């Protein structure tokens, strides 16, 4: 039995979950999320818990069992408290600004990079820190990865965009002649 899949999902007050034949919809105080139900998995709402079971013991069914439970738990967490990722920009001359809903990044290229966040994701800038928040864990993580891709941290001076708390392994560089 899947260790993750067998755990029930607690439904907090203010959250409603509806299960149709092929779609699971979670509504909460922060918004509404929906996910397609995987074919080898049964989803049932019992009192204030949601229970996920699998139809058979095939390898694909076992994999989808834990996945479906984790996706539903992430939707419940998203509509109640939301998700947030922070990116740190470090480098001499690098600038980060928010113009309306556009994120403008000056990362040492000949032109500034403008990034428009998709609907459902909000951006905030505090000095050299970018905060990405939203109700969908997948969407918040994808936006963070897209922004980080503009200037990945390099190993010699650790300049670039990193996740908060990310450690960049530094290289020594040239030894030079003595």
Image (cartoon, grey):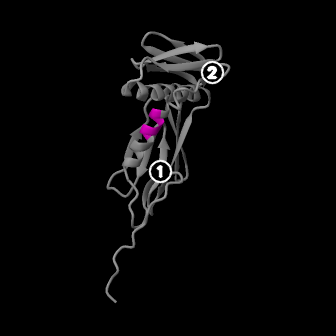
- Residue 5's x, y, as percent? 51, 27
Mark 1 vs mark 2: in front: 2
Q: Nearer the viewer, residue 137 or 62?
A: 62
Secondary structure at numbered mark 2: loop
Which stretch did the figure color magenta? Answer: 138-143
The circle drawn on residue 11 is: 2
Q: Nearer the viewer, residue 149 or 22?
A: 22
For the point 44% across and 61% down, the residue is: 93
In this rendering, the answer to whether 127 lies above or below 92 is above
- Residue 127's x, y, as percent? 55, 52
Q: For residue 56, which quarter of the picture?
A: top left
Residue at the extreme top:
21
- Residue 20's x, y, as percent? 47, 10
For the point 66% across and 19% down, the residue is: 14
The residue carrying mark 1 is 96
How many neighbours does mark 1 have within 10 angstroms: few (below 14), some (14-19), or many (20 or more)? Answer: many
How many circles with numbers are drawn on the protein? 2
Secondary structure at numbered mark 1: strand
For the point 58% across and 29% down, the residue is: 77
Tell me if label 1 and label 2 are in contact, CB under 8 Å: no
- Residue 112's x, y, as percent? 37, 50
**Spatial separation of the CA atoms under disc 1 and disc 2:** 39 Å
For the point 54% across and 26% down, the residue is: 6
């Amino acid at each position: 039995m899947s260790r993750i899949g067998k755990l029930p999902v607690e439904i907090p007050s203010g959250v409603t979950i509806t299960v149709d034949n092929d779609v699971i919809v979670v509504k909460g105080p922060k918004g509404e999320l929906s996910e397609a139900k995987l074919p080898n998995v049964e989803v049932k709402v019992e009192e204030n818990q949601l229970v996920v079971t699998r139809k058979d013991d095939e390898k694909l069914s076992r994999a989808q069992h834990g996945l479906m439970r984790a996706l539903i738990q992430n939707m419940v967490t998203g509509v109640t408290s939301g998700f947030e990722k922070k990116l740190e920009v470090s480098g001499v001359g690098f600038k980060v600004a928010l113009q309306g809903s556009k994120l403008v990044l000056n990362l040492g290229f000949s032109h500034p990079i403008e990034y428009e966040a998709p609907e459902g994701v909000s951006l905030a800038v505090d000095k050299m820190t970018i905060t990405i928040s939203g109700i969908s864990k997948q969407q918040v993580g994808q936006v963070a990865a897209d922004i980080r891709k503009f200037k990945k941290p390099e190993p010699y001076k650790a300049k670039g965009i990193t996740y908060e708390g990310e450690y960049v392994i530094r290289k020594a560089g040239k030894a030079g002649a003595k």
